[in-house]
Image (cartoon, rainbow, N blue to C red):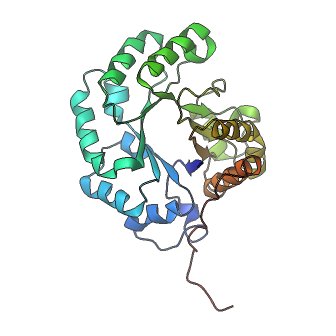
Amino acid sequence: MKLHVGCAMWTHASWQGRLLPHPLAPRERLRAYASWCNAVEGNTTFYATPSAATVSSWAEQTAPDFRLLLKLPKQITHERRLADGDGLLRAFLDVIEPLGPRVHALWVQLPASFGPSDLGTLAAFLHRAPRGLRCTVEVRHPAFFEDPRWEQRLERVLDDVGAEWTTFDTTDLFAAPPTSAAGREAWEKKPRLPRRSRALTAHPVVRYIGRDDAQPTAEGWRHWTRTVADWLHEGRSPTVFIHTPDNEEALTLARRFHDDVRQLVPALEPLPEPLPTGPPTLF
């Protein structure tokens, strides 16, 4: 029984020297992060396919059971909207192949304009994807959340190929007005959609965004600690990513979430102790 938790990135200016060792070479930053969390969102691949050397570095810095959820390049999901992108997909898969089992899933994040009329395109794309790689799909069109007919049709498309529906829960973010610049920016950019808690597969994925204040963030995730505990008891293997608008405490919050689930599921093994931020001292 294992719960994977992580953040939206593995490096953040505010973590350096406070939570992670500093200075730290770029090729060591993922290794340091991986001592805190056992999963990470691969957001950078949305903007550019990484080089072979970069992928090799990621593999060297992580254990095989570390989970990378790699976002498909925007050329595939946003510019071509999953159509006529087989060559781009093949090139991307070839580059990330050395990561092996670390690629827990291909993350298909779709634009808010990708709606019910596009379900045929999504189905065709998922059927063409290699069967050996798990897919998790994030949709943002309101119809999938507000109209049961379209919710059920999307679920059928995903069920047909064993794909998961990524949950991006922003309800806690929007529960109270923002009090910081980062919070206001998140209010402007993040989707405001109903919370969805149904897992389709044995590998549910949750992206939870709270607030800059740690306490209301932790209070807001109680729904998820109970849900994740139930999933673990059912034999599922969830991955949960913790966000806040500024992400300054995301590392500590991800571990706190894991600890809160352990309170409900004592059999869950604890996370290892993270690397120290500096050399040991005598006093």
**Is residue 66 at least partly visible in the picture?**
yes
Which image quadrant for residue 225?
top right
Task: Estimate the x, y position of residue 101 in percent, counting from the top left.
Answer: 38, 48
Residue projecting furthest to the bottom: 282
Residue occupying image coordinates x 31% and y 28%: 129
Residue occupying image coordinates x 62% and y 88%: 281
> Between residues 279 and 128, which one lies in front from this camera angle?
128
Q: Does residue 114 lie above or below 226 as drawn?
A: above
Which image quadrant for residue 163?
top left
Instruction: Specify whether 23 is left or right of 233.
Output: left
Task: Estimate the x, y position of residue 178 in percent, counting from the top left.
Answer: 72, 40
Q: Quadrant of the C terminus?
A: bottom right
Residue occupying image coordinates x 40% and y 63%: 61
Q: Does residue 75 lie above or below 260 as drawn?
A: above
Q: Does residue 22 lie above or below 38 as drawn?
A: below
Instruction: Specify whether 186 is left or right of 256.
Output: left
Q: Does residue 234 lie above or below 143 as drawn?
A: below
Label total for image: 0
**Is residue 81 at least partly visible in the picture?**
no
> Between residues 202 and 189, which one lies in front from this camera angle?
202
Task: Estimate the x, y position of residue 91 in percent, counting from the top left.
Answer: 23, 39
Residue occupying image coordinates x 42% and y 14%: 119
